[in-house]
Structures are given as structure tokens and as C-alpha cells.
Amino acid sequence: MKNLLYIRSLTILIFVIIFLVGINSFRDYGIYTDDSWRRINDLFWYNYIKISILEPSLSFANNLEILLNKNISNEIKTITISSSPSLQTAPLGIFCEFFIDFFNVEGNRNIFQFRHLFNFIIYFVGLCFFYKLIYKRYKSYLYSFSGTLFLFLTPRLFGESFYNSQDISFLTLTIINIYTGINFVRKPNFKHTFAFAISSALSFNTRIMAIIPISVALFFFFFKCLRSNLFFKNNLKFVLYFLICIFFLIIIFWPFLWANPISNLLYAISEISSVRTEVIDLYFGKFILSTTVPSHYYIVWIAITSPLIIISLFLFGSLFFLKRVFIRFSKLNNDLNDMWRGDNEMYDIYFFLF
């Protein structure tokens, strides 16, 4: 009992230290290229929601036209890439603009520092769920501490946790989505289904590539159905509940869809998927376009921006994991019951496949 109390106290202390480091560091980071444009986008859609609430007599389409005819960039006296809003909103960015309005934060310096603080708080929530995710797999406080500190102390992620609002929001929502997805697959019920639907909708509305973790979770759900007829009969209804919930939640959290949900969703996905921004990048001493990067580009950047200890442990763990999966496949029987033994092995395959 004393050991458990000690460990819990240590857990709280570590997260308090992480939080204190964050709130004492958010002023150290300036505005980067996308920062001002992200603020324009978040402010645009926040104003759209605000107008829609304050002027219920006007249609959603009219409200959108009013804002598009207004040069919203005049409200932000800073260098911007474009004053055109993105069709894809960032729900957490809109929440941030709500708090800026609610607390009456004024002045560009104060506004962007507030956004950086808000961004770190979002990241901090992601760290808490990452801790819970590791503990769910290993039931070890040591592994949970270590994994969370690896994520927090990764230099690139630490810096971007303050100023990269969309990517860090997506990272946090993806961690939460994986956590709720595992709960949904392991023990389907109304609570886990709704939590998974909310995290899926928020992450999908932030970046449509969230379809990947959502699909992986559903794949494992149906795979469990193939392994057990009883699981299939008792829990298939929760997939239907999930699909209904996520459809309506995506619409609720994505203001652009309010005017015409189906056609606007298809249009937005088509437009977002076709966007190819050309940026000149210095890579191995040569300038290249972001649209024509070599096949090794991503591997190289991951390698040089990730701490060596994380890369080493990843490679070691991957080799060990693949060996075990190969053995499982070699002994696979017709009822698929040797694919994994227990929840822990299922979690490993889930993480690796994702």
C-alpha cells in the first residue's frame, strides 16, 4: 500500500514538473511560418460559429459569404501566408479562439503567447493519455514514466508543443484516439463507443489522415469478430452506433459542413487531398522541391530529428516483435486463435500496424 502511494505521488510530481516546465517556457518561442495563418483560419471559423449563434435568422451559407467578403487578415497585424481560410477546421484551434475572446486577450504578442500556452496544455493532455496507454499495455509505472519522458524530451516535439498548433493537436488527438480505440476493441460498450467516436471525429476534423488509426481499430474489431462468433453477435451493434455517432459528430465539429453536410464533406475531402504545396528545401547540400523528394527523404529526417536511444529501442523492439509475429503466423490454425494470445499481444500488433 505504501509503495502504491509512493508511486502515485511520484507520478503526480513528474507531471507537475512537466507542466511547470511548459508554463515557464511558452514565452521563449516566436511565431513560425504557419502560426499566423493558423490563427487566421481558427479565427475565421470561430467568427462563423459566433455569427451563426448570434444571427440565427441567417442561413449558414449567408454567414459564410459574409465572412469570406471580409478581409479577416486585417484583424491580425502580422505577416501571413494567405488570408484565405482552409476548408478543414481545427476544432481545438476554435476552442482556443473562444478562450481568447472570453478572457479578452488583446495585442498580437499576448494572443500568440496565449495560443502557445494553450497548445502546450493540449500537448500535456496528450502526455497524460500516452502515460495511460503505456500503462494499459505493460502495467508498469517504470515503463509508463520512461515512455512519457521520451515523448516529452524529444527536442523537436518539445519545441513544436508550443507553436505548431495543428500538428501537435493532431498528435494529441491521435494518442487519445488510439487509447479510446483500444478500449472500444477490447470491451465494446456505449461509453467506450461514444468516447472513440468523439476522439475519431475531432482527429478526423483536424487532419483527414486520422482515417488510418480509425480504420486500424475497426479492422481489429472485425478481426475479433472472425475469431469469436459470440463476440460478433454481442458487439456488432456497437460498430453501427459508432458509425452513426462519428457521422453526426464530424458534422457538429466541422462548421464548413453545416450548410450542406454530404456535398460539402465530399468537396472538402477532394480539395484537401489534392493540395500540394511546393516548398524549397535544403537536403544533403542541394535545394529540392517538396513535391519531388527522394524515397529516403522521410527516413533520413526521422533519423536525424529523433534521439538515438529512441531509434535504437524502436529497432530492437521491432525485430523482437516481428520474430514473435512470424512464429504466430507459422502456427496459425483455421479459427485464427493463435494470431495473438491475450490483450497485450493484440496491443503490440495494433501499435505496430498503426
Image: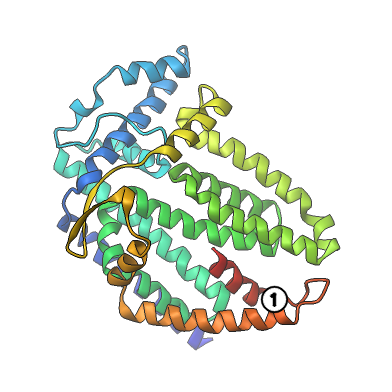
Residue type highlighted by circle 1: Trp
Q: Quadrant of residue 218?
A: bottom right
Q: Secondary structure at mark 1?
A: loop
Is 7 drawn above or below residue 347 in the view shown?
below
Q: Quadrant of the C terminus?
A: bottom right
Task: Residue lying at the far top in this picture: please name it.
Answer: 57
Residue 257, horizontal then vertical, whole percent? 50, 28
Residue 113, horizontal then vertical, whole percent? 20, 48
In the image, 37 versus 281, the foreground residue is 281
Is 164 drawn above or below residue 272 in the view shown?
below
Q: Quadrant of residue 108?
A: top left
> Which residue in the protein does label 1 denote?
340
Q: Residue at x 50, y 78 (%)?
A: 318
In the image, 260 versus 235, the foreground residue is 260
Q: Is there any visible trace of residue 321 in the rendered image?
A: yes
Does residue 274 appear left or right of residue 241 in this picture?
Answer: left
Q: Quadrant of residue 93?
A: top left
Q: Residue at x 61, y 63 (%)?
A: 182
Residue 110, horizontal then vertical, whole percent? 17, 43
Does residue 164 appear left or right of residue 352 in this picture?
Answer: left
